[in-house]
Image (tube, rainbow, N blue to C red):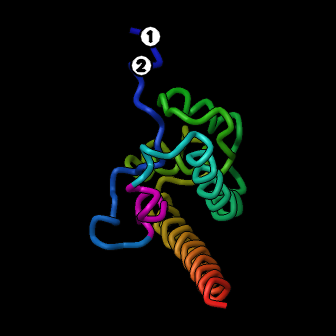
Amino acid sequence: MSKDHQLKALTPCAGRCSTVFGDQVCRGCRRFNHEVIRWNNYTPEQQLAVWKRLDEQLDRILVPMLVHANVLQVEQFLDRKKVRLLPNATWGRKLYHALKLCEKNNRLADESGLGLKSLVVRETWDTFEARVLQLAEASYEFAWVRANSFGKNLIEMVEE
């Protein structure tokens, strides 16, 4: 069997799905509930569009939060920890995975390249999670309002 078939497909799933409890935006991966449900049926282009939106959110939140991070050190850290990323993963995505590893084990902070002391890892993670979830929920609200408005306009056009 080839190596490609041995590796699980990359997914944004963080293993803490809250959409099963009725959340419109997953608190783990920040995908919209319909994206979580239909992910395996999405085309590669559709999946890439979701990845892009999620990575843009990570860039907007984490890059300004972790200004002292060392690019080379973070990339080497992720490589040593065997973190799989898409080839075009953004800086925010890399910071996210490094921070996630440190949140699980704050003793990794010094070697991560994030420029954080172990004592502030948890606080940084909590701040990140609150901000990125707020941004993801705003993104969902905007998409829903836009779709709802489009639907109403379409109905009006059909009724005329």
Q: Residue drawn at (58%, 48%), measured in percent from left and top?
A: 46
Q: Residue drawn at (42%, 72%), measured in percent from left and top?
A: 24
Give, as a three-letter code, the residue at label 1: Ser
Give, as a three-letter code, the residue at label 2: His
| Depth order, front residue of 41/115 | 41
> Can residue 63 be found in the magenta stretch?
no
Which residue in the protein does label 2 denote? Answer: 5
Which residue in the protein does label 1 denote? Answer: 2
| Depth order, front residue of 137/134 | 137
* Residue 144, placed above or below residue 96: below
Q: Residue furthest top?
A: 1
| Depth order, front residue of 10/150 | 150
In screen coordinates, is 121 left or right of 20?
Answer: right
CA gap, disc 1 and disc 2: 6 Å
Q: Residue furthest left?
A: 21
Disc 1 to disc 2: CB gap under 8 Å: yes
Residue 95 visible from this viewpoint: no
Residue 60 visible from this viewpoint: yes
Range of residues picked out in magenta: 25-37
Label 2 residue SS:
helix
* Residue 147, placed above or below residue 13: below
Answer with the quarter of the image where residue 8 lies.
Answer: top left
Label 1 residue SS:
loop
Q: Quadrant of the C terminus?
A: bottom right
In screen coordinates, is 42 left or right of 62?
Answer: left
* Residue 84, placed above or below residue 51: above
